[in-house]
Image (tube, helix red, strand yellow):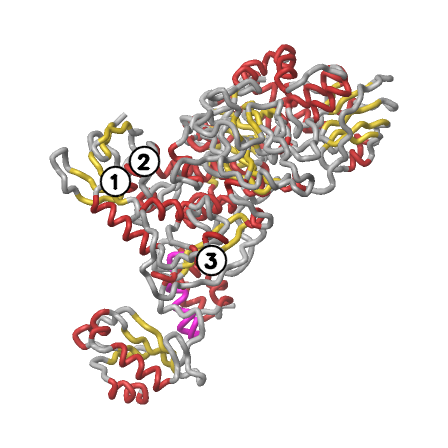
Amino acid sequence: MPTIFIDNKPYNVQPGQNVLHAAVSHGLNLPYFCWHPALGSAGACRQCAVQHFKDESDTQGRMVMSCMTAATEGSRFSINHPTAKSFRADIIEWMMTNHPHDCPVCDEGGECHLQDMTVMTGHNKRRYRFKKRTFENQDLGPHINHEMNRCITCYRCVRYYRDVAGGEDLHAFSASNKVYFGRFEDGPLDSEFSGNLVEVCPTGVFTDKTFRAYYSRKWDLQTAPSICQNCSLGCNISPGERLGTLRRVQNRFHPEINGYFLCDKGRFGHRFVNEKNQVKVVHPIGPLIKEGLMIGIGSPRASLEANYALRKLVGADNFYDGHTELEHRLLSKIMEILSQHPETASLEDVRNADAVFILGEDLTQTAPMLALSIRQNLYKRAQDGAGTQGIPDWNDLAIRNAQPELPKVVYLAHDIPTKLDPLVTHKISTDLESIQDWIPALKAAKNPVIIAGTSLGSEPLIRMSIELRKMAPQAKLCYVLPAANSFGLMLLKPKSTPLLTHRGETAIVLENNLPLSTLSHLHNIIAIDFLESETTKNATLALGCGSFAETTGSMVNNEGRAQRYYSVFERREQRPESWRILRDLGDFSWQNIDELCAEFAQEFPIFEPFLKQVHNTQFRIDGQKIARQSPEFSGRTSMYTNISLHEQAPLQDPDSPLAYSMEGYHGDMPPDLASSYWRPGWNSVSAFNSLSHATSGVKLKP
Amino acid sequence: MLSAEEKSEIDHEITKFPVRRSACLEALAVVQRHRGWVSDDTLKAVADYVGMSATELDGIATFYNLIYRKPVGKKVVRICDSVSCFIMGYDKIRSKIEQELGIQLGQTTPDQEFTLLPTPCLGTCDHAPALMINDSLHRDLNEDNVAQILRHE
């Protein structure tokens, strides 16, 4: 690990890092704009200038851009040198000449990288007294708000949108002082990953329009670490709530899964939490009087804990799969394969693979972040190629010049056009014969990934994946599954639903909307769900439970990684966890999630390593629970005066080491408990650069 | 949308490049020669023809000040506002032209005869101030001769 000196202090840095990355990783206050950990350096904004010295005796030095300078062993720099400092002050002053004075009404205000950098540089008075250049904004669709006057032309948006996400409908227009970032004409952004613009833009040009509809400042949001519910990848998210409504979802870094980005489904697809058609809560409810056969139908979108509680209530013999019959058959096959070949590929493995073979999955639709990971993979291959020419892997523009065409290492078998097609080197139909053509390339690859899944409902393709794996033992397998907790549900060994042919029995349906063909077999339904559905409408008894955002539970993603999501908030009219409803129906004694999990781990030892590692209700830092609210959280004493003039006591959370309060621990914490990034002087998402990048979750083997 | 003639001229430009889309700027120049300017619909047609998104092509079109994305008059007056011309009296020349034509920079006369645009440098600093009207260069301008030049063009 090389050591560099910044203002005469030694710092250990990662080999191959640039000086800016090294400095901000160590928490040093060095301002920058165009660099981004996932985009690399462009050297365009000139804000990260530092003084570079020949040796210890050199006091003069020369100015360099820290993002474009390698942190080599023994090199010496100064952030505080007067020359560099005044240069940086000039740069920010130029950048701010056109920037509006609208922070108080800007959505980015309070979590704005530009605001932070301006304060950090000490620019607090505008000398520029001329007209500012102004632009007309565009309607970029329902998700992204556009406010071009705030732009400082760092080019991060197009470098992300075009170069990382592969979008073709956002571009820089015009030149010099009139550069404009937008579309050819008004209209929704085409990319499935457009939401990341909100976090990539260092200021308020691209902001979250859905958040804007019912807005709150960052420090007024209550957040908790959560897991996306919209597909089987288990991306880490940070939902924010205020006054009982979920306001927005932001990315929560996970090095092996989503990294710095989310798909739009993940970012904008959680609004159902605020829907009005919620099933009425009947709680507490007395124990069920068991009469005749009672069966339970589990759910791949309910937590492990809820599925376990249902299984416990009805018994293993009466616990049925909430997947369709076909899905159940495919998933059983996948589980069988993974019990023998447990080495599944994470998204990071996909990003690093030297060849990717996709069998019948339209990834942009079925697991969008997997599609983005493949795009990132191709860029990594370009980085490797440029590396052989001596170009460091952070030097983005040089890499793209040296490797104008991204290498193609993606093989796709699908019968319809997909959005990944332009990146694919070899596209064929899903006909098994032609897939044989891939074998030489597969065998030659060093760390290939084979991707298959359930979306086409094809068992032969899943069998093909294992045939390919047998020919290339170095390959990792990656399966795209139907829902967020499909893997977890299958580990509880449910029976397939078509076995349900008896009439007159009572069926407890957990968080699931069953097909009418199944429903018609069931006479007496007790449905537990958050939102109304055909199933709850056909039920004898419908019991309302809480959504993922107000309950704590665990899920297993497509790679078999068990992760816990923590409740973000509690409504004033509390909605119970499904497992609590089932506990009451079954008259079990679990008082909190730990007690349930203790029994769960005993019955299913496979979950033991995860349940041991997960931060349970007893976990404390400095003797404190972790605060979900920031120390600046406002309105606590008055936000519920419509209910009572007296300040409401904070709600208690029996199921997690987190508190619904601004009181509690706020500092550095394990990555699976961190949901909001902040450091003094760094109020935007960029604060993350100096925090822990450790991984989390426990991989399970079927 | 593109005429057969335009297409054949663009095809000819495409042969000069290894990649089809690399000819995009030449293609814009071709249609501008035929139509005087590049409308949104024209731009979309060119983008389709060379195989890129309209957004991408417009990014290129708007970068170059000789590709016109709005209609221009028959004669485009491009007055140099770079350092040498600036020192040598660009201000006065510009005011004179604005007064003569009754338009400001970036505007077109109501009779569609003249459009007045700024340009960064015409490469003739030793004869500053200078301007160009379509393809003809006029140098050593002063308030008297500039009106003459406009009238004779």
Q: Are marks 2 and 1 in contact (CB under 8 Å)?
A: yes
* Helix, strand or loop under label 2: loop
Q: CA distance from mark 3 to mark 2?
A: 39 Å
Nearest the camera: A649 or A341? Answer: A649
Q: Residues within 10 Å of mark 3 (few under 14, many from 20)?
A: many
The amino acid type of the residue labelled 3 equals Thr
Residue B146 location, quadrant: bottom left
**Relative to A570, is A662 on the left or the right?**
left
Any mark on residue A79, and which? 1
In the rendered image, which residue does mark 2 sit on? Answer: A28
Q: Position of residue A212 (x, y in %)?
A: 56, 49
What is the span of residues highlighted in magenta in the rendered image? B21-37
Q: How many numbered marks are there?
A: 3
Q: Position of residue B51 (x, y in %)?
A: 46, 56
Any mark on residue A414, and which? none
Task: Give above or below for A645 relative to A628.
Answer: below
Q: Are marks 3 and 2 in contact (CB under 8 Å)?
A: no
Disc with the residue nearer the chain's start (2 vs 1): 2
* Helix, strand or loop under label 3: helix
The amino acid type of the residue labelled 2 equals Leu
Residue depicted at x 62% and y 22%: A654
Q: CA distance from mark 2 to mark 1?
A: 9 Å
Do the residues at pointers 2 and 1 share their chain?
yes
Any mark on residue B55, and which? 3
Q: CA distance from mark 3 to mark 1?
A: 40 Å
Task: Give above or below for A327 relative to A583.
Answer: below
